[in-house]
Amino acid sequence: MKKFSLIVLTLLSLVLAFSGVIALAQEVHTVAEVDSITVIANMIRWGGVLMSSFIIFGAWLLLRFVDAMVAKLGRVFAERRMLLQKLNAFFHFAVYLSVIVATVLLSFQISREVLAILGGATAVAIGFALKDLVASIVAGVLIMIDRPFQVGDRVTFGGQYGDITAIGLRSVRLQTLDDNTVTIPNNMFLNQSSASGNYGVLDMQVVVDFHIGIDQDANLAQSLVREAGATSRFVYLPKPVVTRVSQVVLHNCVALRVRLKLYVLDTKYEKALVSDITLRVMEIFEQHGIRPPELLYRYAGEVPTQALP
């Protein structure tokens, strides 16, 4: 019984002591919060905050006025519109930076401790902001060394297809066939695959598909397609012209695919080659009565197939 009472008294003493520690910690935390609020309140210059509000409003009015002037001058001097917009972008950046610096200097009392805190926070922010930039620069160096593609190559990457016009330390510029300039950060090439069609040479393989009905003359169609490809003015004849025939399902319809593989003389003539061969094959198929795929069905007990009207 005495042992039990001793244990109970010991537990009560520990609980009381722990409660006292918790109360003391809460009091210290409350005092720390009050001190932090007091320090922050003492740092703020309330008169400077009011002045900063006027500066922000004035900067907003100035930018609105400059934007209106740039738009009006761009309509008057159309040939200088791009230059005016570039200058306006630099002006916006300068105004934003000036307003931020002026607002901080007017609204806060800057001490050495505050400068140290702001310097550390700024360094961390700049480090996070430059993380992707550094990764892109490292990837740019790796691209220069590994050379998965070169300037002038026709490349497929990330759903974009076109010619590489520049390889920089930060990004790669790709000119699509629709004449759009696409800028791709270098670090994206580290995790995704790219395909180069010509890899440093002018000629490039082009694949053109034609589809005919399964009841048509496949041998004649293959011969006509090969002839059309070999006689095109854009074909690069030192490399082979190849045709292949296979059976495919096209929109729920069984068809024969005649695939033509050949090399274009220059990558810039790729679409011209495809258009030239397509028009000539369509004309030749019409002359020889070779028809496109149709929905065919077979009657029960009948051998031949009949096309639906």
Image: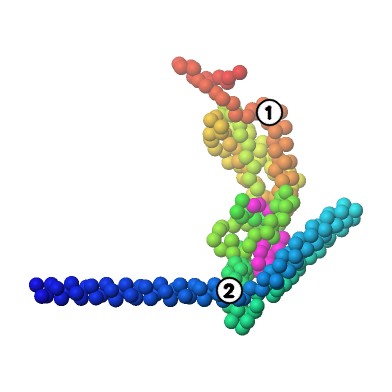
Q: How is the image coloured?
A: rainbow
On residue 196, the disc is: none
The quarter of the rendered structure image containing the N terminus is bottom left
Q: Which residues are magenta?
A: 160-172
200 versus 13 height, above or below: above
- Decide if residue 81 is in sight here: no
Give the quarter of the image for residue 40.
Answer: bottom right
Q: Is residue 281 above or below residue 201?
A: above
Judged from the image, the secondary structure of the residue bearing numbered disc 1 is helix
Tell me the SS state at disc 2.
helix
In the image: residue 171, left or right of residue 301: right
In the image, what residue occupies the spot 75% across and 62% down? 57
Residue visible at 22% across and 73% down in the picture: 11
Q: How far apart are the alpha carbons under marks 1 and 2?
A: 89 Å
Is the residue marked by circle 1 packed among few (<14), some (14-19), or many (20+) residues within 10 Å?
few
Q: Residue 119 falls in which quadrant of the image?
A: bottom right
> Residue lying furthest left in this view?
1
Query: What residue is shown with label 1?
Result: 288
- The residue indicated by pointer 2 is 40
Indicate whether residue 169 is drawn in magenta.
yes
> Which of the 4 image quarters holds residue 21?
bottom left
Q: Looking at the image, do the residues carrying marks 1 and 2 touch, with CB atoms under 8 Å apart?
A: no
What amino acid type is highlighted by mark number 1? Answer: His
* Residue nearer the viewer, 267 or 182: 182
Q: Nearer the viewer, mark 1 or mark 2?
A: 2
Q: Is residue 13 magenta?
A: no
